[in-house]
Amino acid sequence: MSMISAVQYSNFMISTAQIDSLFSAIPISQKQYDSLSNSSLARGIDRYTSAEYDGAVTEFRRAIWLSSFSDNAAKAYDYMAKAYLQDGNTEAAIKTYQEAIKSYPTRAAFHISLGNIYYKQGQLFEAEAEYKVAINLDSESTDSRYGLGQVYLNSERASEAEAQFKKVVSLSPRSSIGYYGLGQTYRKMG
């Protein structure tokens, strides 16, 4: 029995050169997918800028499918959500950002964008949660802190808003958004 096992095993032996050849083909194939994904992303952006939102979404979905965890896919998710928003389909934009977050859970920008949509829809609880996640992921983000400050301001929590806007000012003293938020807060405080 051991003689048969040895013979069967020897029939399946692969040389290291064959293994190297096999695995060297994989990156080339992935490069091709990345290239196709990049092309789809570019076509989607062209359609997006031409206000052809349905066609843009199709190209962005293709870019994501071809290279699911690349920068192309991340950009495609963002543009796709923006295309849905431009087309007036807020629910699809929300779902797109939720999909993006599943694929890229540590990208604060997706949480900020989703928080912005929730904020504009008056869903302050959901917006607050997204901004807080974004802050946990990137404590230096002025956009997430400004958004959270706006949520606090509109939730009658002016002192918490003030703290967020002061943090924005300290992170980016040359930007006007922190000062603007503080002005809104102080006006609301009387």
Image: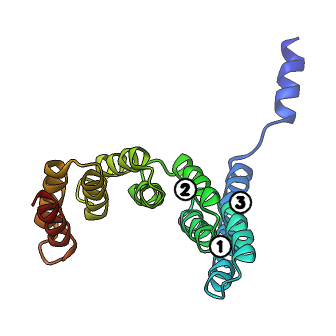
171 in relation to 87, above or below: above
Q: Choose mark 1 or mark 3, whichever is in front.
A: 1
Q: Is disc 1 surrounded by few (<14), some (14 to 19) or many (20+) residues within 10 Å?
A: some
- What is the x, y in percent for residue 40? 70, 75
N-terminal of the pair, mark 1 or mark 3, is 3
Element under disc 1: loop
75 sits to left or right of 161: right
- Front-most of residues 180 and 79: 180
Snapshot quadrant of residue 112: bottom left
In this rendering, the answer to whether 101 lies above or below 54 is: above
Name the residue beneath numbered marker 1: 87
Disc 3/disc 2 C-alpha distance (Å): 16 Å
Give the residue at mark 2. 97
Q: Earlier in the sequence, mark 1 or mark 2?
A: 1
* Residue marked by disc 3: 65
Kind of residue at disc 3: Trp
Residue at position x 14%, y 78% in the image: 174
Tell me residue 8's x, y (percent).
88, 27
Q: Residue at x 35, y 47 (%)?
A: 128
Q: Position of residue 58 (x, y in %)?
A: 75, 69
The answer for how far apart the CA atoms under marks 1 and 2 are is 16 Å
The quarter holding residue 12 reads top right
